């Protein structure tokens, strides 16, 4: 039994030495090349991808191993000099990233690594939203429209349309932000239905936004300043009337009241039908002491063109004075 064990141990050592000498006599393996068989490095969810790995120099058999990062994901042995093919399915975002392959002889030895391939996951764009700070516009006004897809791999390209006619150049956004379109409302034809289109590198995927229409704001904008002006005028008139009551209306009423009081004890105008139109007689009656009596009569003769000067006759307590031609004539 002991002799058999020693014999097997000796056979293993001899076999390993033979294999080692054989491997040392082989051509050295070159760094393998890792390629994506079909398509680009941008992949979508649930997509199948194929990676080929091959060393140009080296004697078969050769072992090829595929790594994602530092984690080995597959191993294939090749007994001829043809490339190996690794088939993968992108089931989640964790399946994308950096891949590389390693080539080595089946007898443990120092292998060689390929350059890395980096897969990126692309997501289809979602339906974009078209909006504006104001839905009203008028002729001769500049307006702004913004278009944004919340989801989708960058870059995203946006184009603006009006009534199925393209009215902007393609705008490629490298960041997750809205594309801004600046327009000038030149005529009534510019008040149409606007839409924007969004697309990225995802194959066969183009999305259109909601419809957006501008409404004419000329009538509303012109009536508002008129109403505001009328309101201000009415307010100023109300304030002016309120201020005029204590300063003008009340003093005027008091003055009229005093004048009326003076008229009741002052000048009384009397005019007979026999008197001419230019002769007016005023009589002033003043209440004095019971034993005194005063009666003043003033007769004014208005001057007419080409006639005698004004004659004024004043009677006071038996004394008569006549004012004529600028002179005073008195009679007692």
Image (tube, helix red, strand yellow):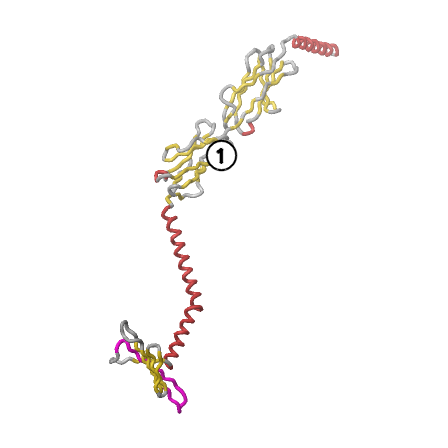
The percent coordinates of residue 279 (x first, y second) are 28, 78
Q: Is 267 within the magenta?
A: no
Could you tell whether 44 is left or right of 16 in the image?
Answer: left
Vertical order, 146 against 308 (above or below): above
| Outermost residue toward the bottom in this view | 291
Main SS category, magenta section = loop
Question: Which residue is painted at 36% across and 35% down in the image?
Answer: 163
Residue closer to the observer: 87 or 310: 310
Q: Is residue 167 left or right of residue 28?
A: left
Picture layout, residue 171 above or below residue 279: above
Residue 291 included in the magenta stretch of the image = yes
Quadrant (top left, top right, bottom left, bottom right) of the C terminus: bottom left
Position of the N terminus, as image quadrant, is: top right
x, y percent for residue 199: 45, 30
Residue at (50% x, 25% y) in the render: 47
| Callout 1 secondary element | loop
Residue behind mark 1 = 151
- Label 1 Cα neighbours within 10 Å, binned few <14 / some 14-19 / many ≥20: some
Report x, y in % for residue 179.
Answer: 47, 35
Extreme residue toward the left, this view? 274
Q: Is residue 14 above or below residue 117?
A: above
Of residue 157 and residue 290, the one placed in the foreground of this image is 290
Q: Say left or right for 51 vs 5.
A: left
> In the figure, residue 183 lies in which quadrant?
top left
Q: Count the marks: how many?
A: 1
Image position of 116 with respect to 297: above or below = above
Look at 40% across and 71% down and name the residue there: 252
Front-most of 290 and 56? Answer: 290
Write the start and end of the magenta stretch as one range.
276-294
């Amino acid at each position: 039994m002991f002799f058999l064990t020693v014999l097997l141990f000796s056979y293993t050592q001899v076999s390993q030495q033979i294999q080692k000498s054989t491997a040392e006599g082989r051509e050295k393996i070159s760094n393998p090349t890792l390629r994506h068989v079909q398509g680009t490095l941008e992949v979508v969810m649930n997509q199948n991808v194929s990676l080929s790995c091959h060393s140009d120099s080296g004697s078969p058999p050769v072992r090829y191993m595929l790594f994602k990062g530092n984690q080995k994901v597959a191993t294939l042995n090749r007994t001829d000099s043809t490339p190996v093919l690794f088939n993968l399915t992108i089931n989640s975002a964790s399946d994308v990233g950096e891949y590389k392959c390693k080539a080595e002889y089946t007898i443990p030895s120092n292998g060689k690594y390929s350059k890395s391939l980096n897969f990126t996951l692309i997501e289809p764009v979602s339906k974009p939203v078209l909006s504006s700070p104001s839905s009203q516009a008028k002729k001769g006004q500049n307006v702004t429209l913004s278009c944004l897809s919340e989801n989708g791999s960058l870059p995203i390209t946006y184009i603006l349309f009006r009534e199925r006619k393209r009215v902007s150049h393609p705008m490629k956004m490298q960041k997750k932000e809205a594309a801004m379109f600046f327009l000038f409302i030149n005529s009534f034809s510019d008040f149409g239905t606007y839409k924007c289109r969004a697309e990225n590198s995802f194959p066969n995927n183009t999305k259109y936004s909601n419809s957006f229409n501008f409404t004419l704001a000329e009538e509303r904008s012109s009536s508002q300043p008129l109403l505001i002006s009328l309101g201000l005028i009415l307010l100023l008139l109300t304030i002016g009337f309120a201020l005029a009551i204590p300063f003008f209306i009340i003093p005027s009423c008091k003055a009229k009241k005093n004048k009326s009081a003076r008229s009741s004890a002052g000048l009384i105008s009397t005019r007979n039908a026999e008197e001419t139109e230019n002769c007016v007689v005023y009589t002033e009656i003043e209440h004095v002491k019971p034993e005194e009596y005063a009666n003043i009569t003033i007769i004014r003769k208005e001057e007419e063109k080409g006639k005698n000067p004004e004659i004024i006759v004043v009677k006071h307590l038996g004394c008569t004075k006549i004012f004529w031609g600028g002179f005073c004539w008195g009679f007692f």
